[in-house]
Image: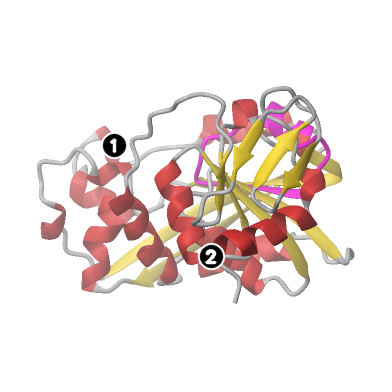
Amino acid sequence: MLSKKEKSAVWIQRNIDVFSCPHCQSDMTLKENKTLVCHNNHSFDLAKQGYMNMLTHQVNSMYDQSLFEARKKVIDAMLYEQMYEEILRHLPTEKASINVLDTGCGEGTHLQKLKDFYTGEMAAAGIDIAKEGILAAAKNYSEIMWIVGDLAKSPFASNSFDVILNILSPANYDEFKRLLKPNGKVIKIVPQSGYLKELREQFYAQSEKEAYSNDKTVARFKESFPHVDTLRVTATKKISTELVPLLAHMTPMGWHQEQKMDDVKLTEITIDVEILIGTL
């Protein structure tokens, strides 16, 4: 049985063409199934957990292990099922295999769900600046390439991906355009006005934060891509008592509240997102 590190090496070797050095942008090779090396001898080692740290500079992340553990449990409850169904309808099906990159993937559960549900072959990679998230991803999911990295200095080659996912996460549109294959798609998910409204009502009742808009984010996306399709997914789901504090913990709403998260009482939660699909 292969170790996590060995399994990761297999996937990286199989998809070595998608990588380029984040320092000098030259091609990379995998040496001894454990180290990515470029022509200028910049190198990155596979961790024993099966991920690759390809950051070129030190970063500080506000996200810790407990947040990613909470996020995994909430996402595993399939609150985002309708969102997955719509994303899957827009993934290419005419190719034998597609390359998919999830940017800001966190602990990787969204990407793993989509890979599981996709009916074709998918070579998937997830990148996040938070090492704790990628560590959790590599621990739980072994057939995806997990990369600690910064999109401002990304370790991927131009024209490498059929689909770039950007789910409830900051974006770098110039980099997305560089990484897309011809006729590729960027699929960005942004919260809409009803997203987690039951939680917001408890934390921000009678304040301006009880309601919000992502109109500026949507407008910027439309400015960045000449062809954009949009659709909205709204679903109200039952939520178990034990998931409520985890849901609060994984969102910025729960980070700086005097009200204890354990005191939040919900029986249902609304997932309300807009799916933006951009092509060049």
Say whether marks 2 and 1 touch (CB < 8 Å). Answer: no
Which residue is the site of mark 2?
A: 141
Residue 168 on the magenta segment: yes
Mark yes or no: residue 83 visible. no
User: Toward the viewer: 84 or 209?
Assistant: 84
Question: Residue extending furthest front?
Answer: 32
Pointer 1 local density, CA inside 10 Å: few below 14, some 14–19, many at least 20:
few
Residue 153, picture quadrant: top right
The answer to which image quadrant residue 176 occupies is: top right
* Image location of residue 99, percent across then percent down: 77, 54
Magenta segment boundaries in residue numbering: 157-178
**Front: mark 2 or 1:** 2
Q: Position of residue 128 (x, y in %)?
A: 52, 42
How many numbered marks, from 0 up? 2
Residue position for label 1: 209
Q: Return the x and y of residue 34 as percentages of the image width and height.
A: 64, 50
How would you rate the neighbour count of disc 2 (Cα within 10 Å): few for under 14, some for 14-19, many for 20 or more? some
The quadrant in which the N terminus is found is: bottom right
Q: Helix, strand, or loop for circle 1?
A: helix
Q: Could you tell me which quadrant the C terminus lies in?
A: top right
What x and y, as percent, mark residue 76? 43, 70
Compared to 60, does 9 lie above or below? Answer: below
Q: Is residue 143 left or right of residue 68?
A: right
